[in-house]
Image (spheres, rainbow, N blue to C red):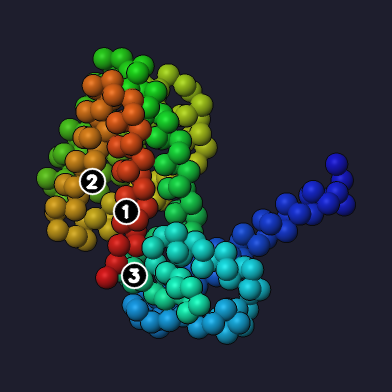
Amino acid sequence: MTLEDPTVKTATRRGKDRTLSDRCYENILSMIVSGEFAVGSKLPTEHALSEQLEVSRPVLRQALKQLREDGVVVSRQGSGSFVQRRPEGAVLDFAPVGSIADIQRTFEFRVAIEGEAAFLAAARRSDADLKAMRAALEELDRCVARDELGVDTDELFHEAICTASGNQYFSAARASMKPNILIGLNLTRNLSLTKPKERMEMVQREHYAIMEAIEARDSEAARLAMRAHVDNARMRVFEGQ
């Protein structure tokens, strides 16, 4: 296959469009966070917004689609796009520049991968696996009590579940994107620390729901609890005002 192959050209173009849509997504998000576009207000027309951001309308539409999926904007047929939620400024403070779109897509990937890992872990877990999960949760309890971040311990809990699945490819998939996962965990746990303690306690209850389902060998409950936990984390990034 040469560089002139149309398949390569198409893939390259899609990759470039993806990068542009992510930048566009983050630019619009920044304008919403700053208050330039207030909650309930209508965004400029696609034509005006694409000119302002210097992107094509297909790229803009992809960015708006991502913002809809993240609950930040909502489309009303025949009326345009409106700001539904204003994320807190702390989101941009804690997240590395240009990483928000990637963090959200990492969460989407984790929902699929870790949901299935939890499903298998419930059927295959050993006493040693349960001990590792329990130790991580007990350490996270201490982190919550002391208002500590606990990113590494949170990661250990999720890694223990992948190990318990008995399928090394779940662990390999997570390992391949561990830097992205840790950025997401750092962001969500930092944001939770800015909230009343009940927020971190709620996150911890989600962890315990996963653990209890795995311990009870209830595969379907484990899958649903894990998927809900990771997707809740994704949505909590933009909980906002």
Q: Residues within 10 Å of mark 1 (few under 14, many from 20)?
A: many
Q: Nearer the viewer, mark 3 or mark 2?
A: 3
Q: Which mark is residue 85?
A: 3
Amino acid carrying label 1: it is Thr
Q: Circle 2 sits on which residue?
A: 203
Q: Residue at x 45, y 64 (%)?
A: 68
Amino acid carrying label 2: it is Val
Mark pair 1, 3: CA separation: 17 Å
Q: Position of residue 219 (x, y in %)?
A: 33, 25
Q: Position of residue 200 (x, y in %)?
A: 20, 49
Quadrant position of residue 161 = top left
Q: Which mark is residue 188?
A: 1
Q: Which mark is residue 92?
A: none
Q: Residue furthest left?
A: 145
Quadrant position of residue 76 = bottom left
Above or below for 105 versus 132: below
Q: Nearer the viewer, residue 125 or 44?
A: 44
